[in-house]
Image: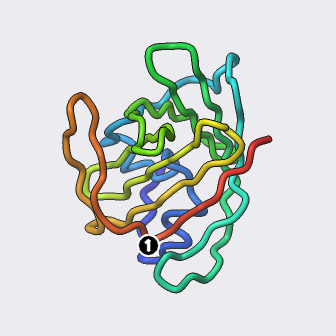
Amino acid sequence: MRCIRSGSLAISLLVLPILSMSCASAYMRGAEPVAAPPTNATASYQVAACTDMTTQQPLPAPKIRYWLVEGGEKPVLYEQGDGEAVTMITNHWIGPDGSDTWFMWAARSYGFQWVIPQDRATGVRFVYAPGAFKSFADGDVSKVAGTAGALCTLIRD
């Protein structure tokens, strides 16, 4: 695999799923690569639309699928881009409104946060550019502080 370097938020953050940033995948925090999508998902999602948070202009929606697996100690979210490897996102907490929240990041690279409300009908994916966020420990999870550069809406399949 080769490293992709670009200053374009639309290309670097939205068109590519987490693991397609092959150099960053070696430094992932809050997630890990797995062999295949789960077979016991309770819900699945795809990206419907994305927005640049600075300009409020639409961005291309990447072809990324998500699977939510519940029933364990904590819900786990899986991600797979079109033709890419699968990532299991495990860094999870419950947000103030009761929504399930996940965050993963790569050292000196991008950060991603997902929020799925308890009704499971939709969700969102926030994308943080390098230098636009910091991770911090809160108990046994790592949370994010910063400004998201993009927001993608997830719809349930």
Q: How many marks?
A: 1
Taking 93 as reference, is 135 left or right?
left
Residue 19's place in the image compared with 58, above or below, is: above
Three-letter residue code for mark 1: Ser
Q: Residue at x 52, y 86 (%)?
A: 55
Residue that numbered label 1 is attached to: 6
Q: Residue furthest top?
A: 72
The crowding category of the residue bearing disc 1, from other C-alpha atoms within 10 Å (few below 14, some 14 to 19, many at least 20), is few
Percent of width and height locating residue 155: 73, 50
Viewer-proximal residue, 123 or 30? 123
Viewer-proximal residue, 65 or 100? 100
Q: Residue at x 57, y 82 (%)?
A: 56
Q: Quadrant of residue 71?
A: top right
Percent of width and height locating residue 12: 49, 66
Residue 12's place in the image compared with 154, above or below, is: below
Q: Circle 1 sits in a helix, a strand or a loop, which is it? A: loop
Viewer-proximal residue, 54 or 61? 54
Percent of width and height locating residue 87: 51, 35
Residue 136's place in the image compared with 3, above or below, is: above
Q: Quadrant of the C terminus?
A: top right
Q: Residue furthest front?
A: 97
Q: Quadrant of residue 79?
A: top right
